[in-house]
Amino acid sequence: MKRAAYALEVMAVAAIVSLTSSVGAEESQLPRSGTAHVHSGWAGIGEAKEVGKNHLVWLGTYYGTSFNDTGKGFMNQVAWICHGASNILDGAIALEGFCTTTDADGDQVFGSNRGKGQWGDVFVGAVTFTGGTGKYAGIQGANAYRCNAVGQSGQLFCTNEVSYKLP
């Protein structure tokens, strides 16, 4: 009788472990498509050159980190690096560049970046995904962002709406 009860306990524990393991495995796999609501913080390092009256060109790199609202999955705990050039004419900013994001596994998503805004006001744009490595190979989609300046040294805080599709 004790052997039968012990055997049932072992089978029950094995079933629970099996179910728990399969749920975890499914959650760790990236869905083939999806969306994410993301927050990010940024700082830029670069150099501005005056090229005419009320006309500047800024060349530099933005560094940022992002996390999504769910605290897991796509675009959660990633590091960004974005190189770019901004044309600033009469306070209107037009940015073009290229971004790469790297997740905790070292896999990357990269894409072209375009944004615009008024000096000292909201800045909006999007990174259009052009490819990736590892689990992101062949990715398509975009990271639409809306940023506000914070601090005294050019820091930005952004909210992002991200959508993606994998082959």
Image: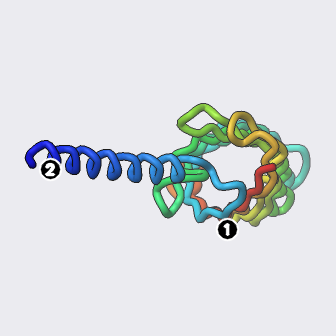
Determine the secondary structure under disc 1.
loop
- Vertical position of residue 10 compared to residue 105: above or below: below
Q: Nearer the viewer, mark 2 or mark 1?
A: 2
- Vertical position of residue 110 compared to residue 89: above or below: above
Q: Position of 9 compared to 34: left or right?
A: left
Q: Find disc 2 in the rendering and name its residue.
A: 5
Amino acid type, callout 2: Ala
Q: Tell me the residue at 72%/61% (across/down).
A: 163
Amino acid type, callout 1: Asp
User: Looking at the picture, how far across and down is residue 167, in whole percent?
Assistant: 81, 49
Return the residue found at the far right.
52
Depth check: give the residue in front, 135 or 18: 18
Return the residue found at the far top.
106
Question: Label 2 crowding class (10 Å Cα cut-off): few <14, some 14-19, many 20+?
Answer: few
Q: Tell me the residue at 76%/41% (across/down).
A: 110
Q: Find disc 1 in the rendering and name its residue.
A: 121
Determine the secondary structure under disc 2.
helix
> Which of pointers 2 and 1 lies earlier in the amino acid sequence?
2
Residue 8 appears in view: yes
Depth check: give the residue in front, 20 or 111: 20
* Quarter where residue 97 is shown: top right
Q: Tell me the residue at 47%/49% (across/down).
A: 22
Q: Tell me the residue at 14%/50% (across/down).
A: 5
